[in-house]
């Protein structure tokens, strides 16, 4: 019988070990990744039957090659590597079954894809969409009185309820980005005097303050633009900006809401992201 010696796993063993891990710890219910976002391996290569005498579940009848074989290795996070050192709770057969069940998920790619498809859900589908009745509080707070004609009230209400409905269907990232854009909006400079009431957002400022991935950020901006909430202008004072829009009404409601939140010390990001417009109605 050969002397037990720890041998490093071969590359041809590590490849299927990694691919069949699904980048997750094999311990049931654990989703700890084996590689972090920087691509560094943060998992543990674990022996079912230990490489050396004195180790957990050591089998003196195994060869050194068998000990480093695919069948005897599995990937776990540090915590569950330690947990499974409790041999009385995790004997060889138990460990082998944990490995088999975990790797089976990723060994049948067609089944795995089907599971992924079955788990995909529209996170916006269960969102309850509120509606507003008049926006009276918004006008009274800003102007001291709501003296709109009935047809103008109807115009504002219809336009804003349509906007809320569209906003509710935004991806979570788009909803957060639009809310952030409102909070960081800037006024258009007047040609010969004060600023106008038109507002825009500088996408590069948003990129700097969020440190978001450039491509992803602009994809989200495009989602918002397609919904009619932003309009790209590539030639405003020599830079590209997005004008903030609300279709269907002459009132600059988004800017009015921003002023309302400033006066009431309310968080416009929270109001918009959570579709909570009760205060302005």
Image: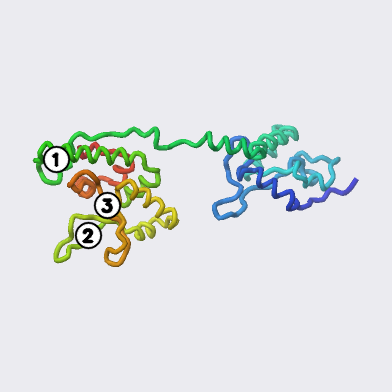
Residue holding disc 1: 152
> Residue 85 appears at what percent x and percent y?
70, 39
Instruction: Please tell me whether mark 2 or mark 1 is closer to you in this view.
Output: 1
At mark 2, the secondary structure is: loop
Work out whether residue 120 or residue 1 is closer to the camera in this orientation and state it.
120
Displayed quadrant of residue 79: top right
What's the residue at 82%, 47% (across, down)? 65
Tell me the quadrant of the picture where the N terminus can be found.
top right
Where does the image place residue 278, in percent across and percent down from the top left?
24, 36
18, above or below 191, in the image: above
Q: How far apart in space, not on screen, are marks 3 and 1 (Cα)?
A: 21 Å
CB under 8 Å between discs 2 and 1: no
Q: Is residue 8 left or right of residue 24?
A: right
Q: Is 180 displayed left or right of 55 in the figure?
A: left
Residue farthest right in this picture:
1
Look at 14% across and 64% down and name the residue there: 193
Percent of width and height locating residue 225: 33, 50
- Determine whether, in the image, residue 62 is placed left or right of residue 107: right
Name the colouring of the figure.
Answer: rainbow
Q: Quick one: label 2 or label 1, which is nearer the N terminus? A: 1
Find out whether the residues at labels 3 and 2 contact each other: C-beta distance under 8 Å. Answer: no
**Mark 3 or mark 2, which has the lower sequence index?**
2
Q: Position of residue 246 (x, y in %)?
A: 25, 47
- Residue under circle 3? 244
Query: Would residue 262 be found to the left or right of residue 57 on screen?
Result: left
Which of these two is toward me, 99 or 83?
99
Q: Secondary structure at mark 1?
A: helix
Name the residue nearer the viewer: 129 or 278.
Answer: 129
Q: Residue at x 62, y 37 (%)?
A: 110
Mark 3: few, some, or many residues within 10 Å (few <14, many ≥20)? many
Which mark, by number, is residue 188? 2
Q: Which of 17 and 158 lies nearest the eye of the viewer?
A: 158
């Amino acid at each position: 019988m050969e002397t037990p010696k720890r041998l490093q796993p071969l590359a041809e063993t590590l490849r299927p070990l990694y691919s069949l891990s699904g980048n997750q710890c094999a311990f049931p219910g654990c989703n700890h990744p084996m590689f972090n976002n920087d691509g560094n391996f943060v998992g543990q290569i674990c022996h079912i039957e230990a490489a050396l005498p004195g180790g957990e579940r050591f089998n003196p009848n195994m060869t050194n090659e068998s000990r480093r074989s695919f069948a005897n290795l599995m990937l776990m996070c540090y915590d569950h590597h330690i947990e499974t050192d409790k041999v009385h709770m995790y004997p060889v057969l138990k460990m082998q079954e944990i490995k088999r069940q975990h790797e089976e998920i990723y060994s049948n790619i067609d089944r795995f894809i089907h599971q992924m498809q079955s788990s995909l859900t529209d996170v916006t589908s269960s969102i309850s969409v509120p509606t507003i009745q008049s926006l009276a509080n918004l006008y009274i707070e800003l102007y001291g009185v709501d003296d709109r004609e009935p047809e103008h009230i109807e115009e504002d209400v219809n336009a804003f309820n349509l906007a809320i409905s569209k906003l509710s269907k935004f991806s979570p990232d788009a909803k957060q980005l639009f809310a952030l854009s409102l909070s960081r909006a800037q006024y258009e400079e007047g040609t010969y005097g004060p600023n106008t009431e038109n507002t825009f957002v500088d996408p590069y400022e948003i990129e700097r303050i969020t440190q978001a991935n450039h491509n992803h950020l602009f994809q989200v901006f495009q989602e918002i633009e397609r919904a009619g909430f932003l309009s790209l202008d590539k030639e405003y004072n020599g830079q590209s900006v997005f004008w903030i829009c609300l279709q269907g009404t002459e009132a600059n409601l988004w800017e009015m809401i921003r002023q309302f939140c400033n006066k009431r010390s309310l968080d416009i990001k929270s109001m918009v992201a959570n579709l909570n417009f009760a205060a302005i109605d």
